Image: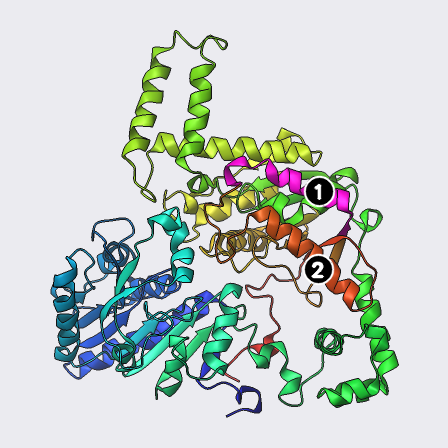
Amino acid sequence: MSTFTRLEHIPVRILPDHEAIAVEVAGRIAALIRARAAEGRKAVLGLATGSTPVGIYRELIRLHRDEGLDFSGVVTFNLDEYFPMDPGSVHSYHRFMRENLFDHVNVPAGQIHVPRGDLDREATEAHCEAYEAAIRAAGGIDFQILGIGRSGHVGFNEPGSGRDSRTRLIYLDTVTRADAAADFFGEENVPPEAVTMGVATILGAREIALVATGEHKSAVVRRAVEGEVHADVAATYLQDHPAATVYLDPAAAAELTRVRTPWTLGEVEWTAEREAEAVLWLSRQTQKPILHLSTKDYRDHHLSSLVARHGSAGPLNGDVFNLLISKIRGRSKLPAGERVVVFSPHPDDDVISMGGALRKLTENGNRITVGYQTSGNIAVFGHEVRRYLDFVERARDLLDLARHEALTRRVEAVEEHMARTGAGEVDAADVLSLKRIIRETEAVSALESVGLGADAARFLDLPFYQTGKVRKDPIGERDVEICFELLEETRPGIVFAAGDLSDPHGTHRMCLEAVRRALDAYGGPPPQLWLYRGAWQEWPLTEADILVPMSAGELRRKILAIFKHQSQKDVAPFPGPDPREFWQRVEERNRGTAELLRSVGLPAYYALEAFVVLERGERLTPTLVPTSSLGEG
């Protein structure tokens, strides 16, 4: 065991991104399938659902299609299913598995097992017993894929699940139902129960891979990996399994001690960024301003080697203080007269994440184009469409629309379809188009509120998003081409893109991938790339390269720009792990960044936006995490 992993009670693999995880885990599964086939035996796989394993399934499909991986000798058992749930529902895990794996590989139908959520309660108990019996009859599960919920559940083994639990019907925790609300367009539509494999069933697998990606999983990952085994966090039971491994991207690993505060574990290689992290950490631990930290403070907190590099605390404190203060850029220090492209994954991410900087850049005379990468139409509730249709009805006479019978028929058809469409089901094309138009008009209004005109907006409507469902297609060549064409048209000196890695459904990550690939193909002078966050997380002070201050009035104007997105206000359709409205998160995060800066002894601003900047020609990595934190450790 490495010094830096001594607090980890289960092996952890930190890989560069979700794609690397998918390739490694799928490769392990492929090797197992081939080994079992050579032995004349079937490979028994335990499968999970949700966004986490989709990349693994796509890689398995590729291996089947391109390398002839044969699934005819594979038996599968899925972890869980909602209850009650029709197997044909868009929310059903039966359907999820067909669409994401089974329809694309040659697993015989008779060898596929998914718990049923469509039986009555009495029959479900017998079904659970039969499910356990089928696993035993197959010889047990060889390889089990797991995700992890914010409550620490694996499968749907919620807090309180016992180590000896088996497949059963269980009530869902409030956190789990809140996290599922986006898929069901409202928590009230989430089924209250689920059928799930038990903890003992999962631990019976010969090998287990728990996969987690994204910053929003980092806290529970640390609890599962470094915490004590406890029924409140079912994932901690994996610590007792002889062949369980946790696979993480750097964002999900961010709270592990070896990543967050490695100097508390042993001697580290000091870089400028790590020195700043340690000094900021010490300032907060001691509740002293940076310039007040003493040599004794460093020695008392495992940082003797750091202060020794500088001779005493004074020079080190001064270096970090100056580094942080150099990041602050008011309007006079921001770019002026540049061609700027802002890539916004959804039609509101520009003002949510960089509304203050966007106004200042506009005032500085930059030529700004905002490319809205997706329509955001699935994040519009039906009542918003009905409100606009009601407006059309009431304005018929005034707008001289009364004679247009085709309009009447079209409106009636839209209303009829919406009346038949259940929560989360795919809308008709006309309804999706109306929702797209609603988001576009809101985006233009928000741009006008920061000083830009409608001509600054480009609605790119990338194809990967156009599924009509929460789950999207992979980024394809056309998605990249559209982003590339905007770069060719505008020839920017600066590009802004979303660096959020906590987007619960991955749209921000996928949009960043499209930008990255477009920039790789771009033949013009390479632009400087500014990455913003804000919808779910903010850049830490040590990672941020530029901090843009805002006064109370400027923050208020930014919030008013967010308010222009009326369809996203009051109740966020896809809130993720934070149930607050986006403007509330923005206010807390922008002010929180400023307060953190003040608390360590730097100037007291009202609010701050943070950006990571990659210089012209500097390669955009998928992770933006120092490579020293990667690997097995």
Left or right: where 197 falls relative to 16 = left
Residue at mark 2 to residue at mark 1: CA–CA distance: 16 Å
Could you tell me the amino acid type at mark 1? Answer: Arg
Residue 19 position within the rendered picture, expressed as x and y whole percent measured from the top left: 44, 65
Residue shown at the point (46%, 25%) measured from the top left: 388
**Is 410 colored magenta in this rendering?**
no
Check disc 2 and report the residue beneath it. Answer: 593
Q: Is residue 51 visible?
A: no
Q: Is residue 273 left or right of residue 578?
A: right
**Amino acid at circle 2:** Thr
Q: Which residue is mark 1?
A: 556
Q: Quadrant of residue 366?
A: top right
| Magenta residues, start to end | 549-569
Give how far across and how far down residue 105 sits, in percent: 23, 62
Q: Secondary structure at mark 1?
A: helix
Q: Position of residue 230 (x, y in %)?
A: 41, 81
Q: Overall secondary structure of the magenta stretch? A: helix
Q: Position of residue 492 (x, y in %)?
A: 67, 44
Q: From the viewer's perspective, is residue 216 above or below residue 561?
A: below
